[in-house]
């Protein structure tokens, strides 16, 4: 049985440095096409595919979708869409199509490429926004584009740009850039641009001066910035400056207090001891201090201030990614699964470390602490409902890469939590499809879609009743999808734990 220190070390794989799987590298997966040739996994064959007689969400019943060369070339009533000669046709009578597939707006992935990238499309997630970019993600994106790896479309952030000291220690290598002033902040943005980042990731411990320099330099470099709202920056200011999205609900909860000025002073007093040698120790310290301030904010919640702020976010077009999944796992620990069939798709040495990590983060809570933390979580659900009422665009994201969140699977659970918060099912689907696709600039004619056995508009849990998936023009029917999931489970089972001490702990809210 591993010690706590060993568990925290081996849990590094998906949130920090390099992890090499014991399974062989993912190879191109040949498949036979209608003309007798083969095409690699993730590639479209150049032939035409027709998905007929399905209900297309947002369009109507008995629709046909024509796909050629990785593009959707026509969608219409089945009786009105001619099927070209030589087309491979799939009769989807009684099925429901989610055009574009699902989009996961907040993920962190580091680990075996035989495991992580395929899990997204195999669960109907055809695009992801990577919130802690590294060269590995660009490598995966290139392999997916070349048809050498099955995976989603990947939109990739810069390294995390944070203040000094960051919540993340040097056990993350060069994946965190600490900036102390405006010149170093501008330099970090220019380096992000040179690295090929699609956008700039801002973080919790930035000073207002450094944050505003990042925002200005990002505009100069033609990049958007997104991420955490810094602890000492009013969220209205971040919105006015043009932050594309605000991740998690920490900052929003603090900003809706009638005592925001006092709350901000309390946040400014939070200190991260740079002598703490590991990211886990630093994060745990920040986490405990912030929870105490959040409780004060809940106690002084101001409806009028909340509505004025959320109306401002809506007017500015600022998106919010609530990541209820990670808030739920940390604040409703009584509901954590002790086991789940989904865990079979990740290395056992990783999933087995989660209880130890969560115990380290949450141990020592009194009965009063637990009651308060449960109330904080319920308040987060209320804030999500208020954001929706105000017309703030919500995006579905999970913080996958943290404990108890399995890539691909976890997005479906996030959709359930958004419904629990009070959002209509149609709007929850919008938060996982059209809304993030527009923000990320994904092409409207991309040949990605999700085919379901039941209508998700009547029950959001039906997004988990997957019949088949189209990813970049490749159609994965039920049998192939199940076969590929079995391949992932075998690769996960064969994965060896990383060497101790090579990376940051696999923790949360990043």
Image (cartoon, grey):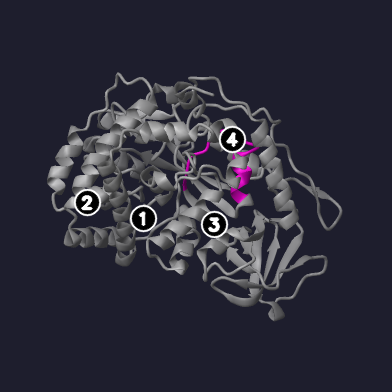
Q: How far, Cα to Cα, is label 3 from label 4?
A: 22 Å
SS assignment at label 3:
strand
Which is more foreground, mark 3 or mark 2? 2
**On the image, numbered disc 4 is attached to which residue?**
139
Q: Mark 4 or mark 2: name the one nearer the start of the chain.
A: 4
Which numbered marker is on residue 102? 3
Position of residue 88 measured from the top left corner of the image (x, y, whole percent): 79, 64
Q: Mark 3 or mark 2: name the one nearer the start of the chain.
A: 3
SS assignment at label 1:
strand
Q: How far, Cα to Cα, is label 1 from label 3?
A: 17 Å
Residue at the location (69% across, 80% down)?
Answer: 80
SS assignment at label 4:
helix
Bounds of the magenta segment: 106-121
Viewer-side residue, 429 vs 223 = 429
Which is more foreground, mark 3 or mark 4? 3
Position of residue 319 measured from the top left corner of the image (x, y, whole percent): 36, 55
**On the image, numbered disc 2 is attached to which residue?**
298
**Within-10-Å neighbours for mark 4: few <14, some 14–19, many 20+:** few
Residue at the location (28% across, 35% down)?
Answer: 288
Taking the image as drawn, is residue 340 in sight? yes
């Amino acid at each position: 049985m591993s010690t706590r220190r060993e568990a925290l070390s081996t849990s590094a794989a998906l949130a920090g440095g390099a992890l090499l799987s014991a399974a062989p590298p993912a190879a191109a997966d040949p498949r036979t096409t209608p003309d007798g040739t083969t095409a690699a996994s993730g590639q479209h064959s150049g032939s035409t595919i027709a998905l007929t007689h399905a209900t297309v969400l947002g369009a109507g019943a008995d629709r046909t979708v024509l796909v050629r060369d990785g593009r959707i070339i026509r969608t219409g009533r089945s009786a009105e869409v001619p099927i070209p000669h030589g087309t491979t046709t799939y009769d989807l009578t009684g099925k429901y199509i989610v055009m574009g597939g699902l989009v996961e707006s907040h993920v962190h992935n580091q680990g075996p490429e035989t495991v992580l990238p395929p899990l997204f499309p195999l669960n109907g997630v055809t695009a992801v926004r990577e919130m802690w970019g590294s060269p590995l993600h660009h490598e995966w994106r290139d392999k997916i584009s070349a048809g050498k790896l099955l995976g989603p479309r990947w939109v990739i952030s810069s390294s995390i740009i944070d203040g000094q000291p960051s919540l993340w220690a040097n056990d993350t290598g060069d994946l965190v850039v600490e900036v102390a002033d405006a010149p170093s902040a501008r330099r970090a943005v220019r380096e992000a641009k040179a690295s090929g980042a699609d956008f700039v990731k801002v973080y919790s411990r930035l000073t207002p001066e450094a944050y505003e320099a990042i925002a200005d330099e990002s505009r100069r470099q033609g990049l958007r910035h997104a991420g955490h709202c810094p602890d000492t920056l009013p969220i209205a200011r971040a919105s006015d400056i043009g932050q594309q999205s605000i991740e998690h609900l920490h900052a929003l909860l603090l900003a809706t207090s009638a005592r925001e000025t006092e709350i901000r002073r309390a946040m400014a007093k939070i200190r991260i001891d740079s002598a703490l040698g590991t990211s886990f120790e630093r994060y745990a310290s920040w986490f405990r201090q912030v929870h105490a301030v959040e409780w004060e904010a809940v106690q002084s919640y101001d409806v009028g201030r909340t509505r004025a702020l959320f109306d401002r976010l809506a007017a500015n077009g600022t998106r919010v990614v609530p990541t209820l999944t990670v808030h739920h796992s940390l604040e409703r620990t009584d509901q954590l699964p002790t086991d789940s069939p989904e865990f079979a798709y990740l290395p056992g040495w990783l999933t087995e470390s989660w209880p130890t990590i969560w115990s380290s983060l949450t141990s020592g809570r009194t009965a009063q602490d637990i009651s308060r933390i449960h109330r904080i979580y319920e308040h987060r659900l209320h804030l999500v409902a208020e954001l929706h009422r105000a017309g703030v665009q919500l995006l579905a994201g999970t913080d996958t890469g943290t404990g108890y969140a399995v890539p691909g699977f976890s997005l479906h659970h996030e959709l359930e939590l958004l419904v629990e918060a009070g959002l209509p099912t149609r709007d929850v689907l919008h938060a996982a499809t059209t809304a993030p696709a527009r923000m990320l600039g994904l092409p409207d004619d991309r040949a990605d879609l999700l085919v379901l056995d039941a209508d998700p508009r009547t029950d959001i849990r039906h997004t988990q009743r997957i019949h088949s998936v189209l990813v970049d023009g490749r159609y994965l029917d039920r049998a192939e999808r199940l076969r590929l999931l079995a391949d992932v489970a075998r690769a996960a089972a064969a994965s060896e734990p990383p060497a101790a001490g090579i990376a940051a702990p696999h923790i949360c809210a990043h």
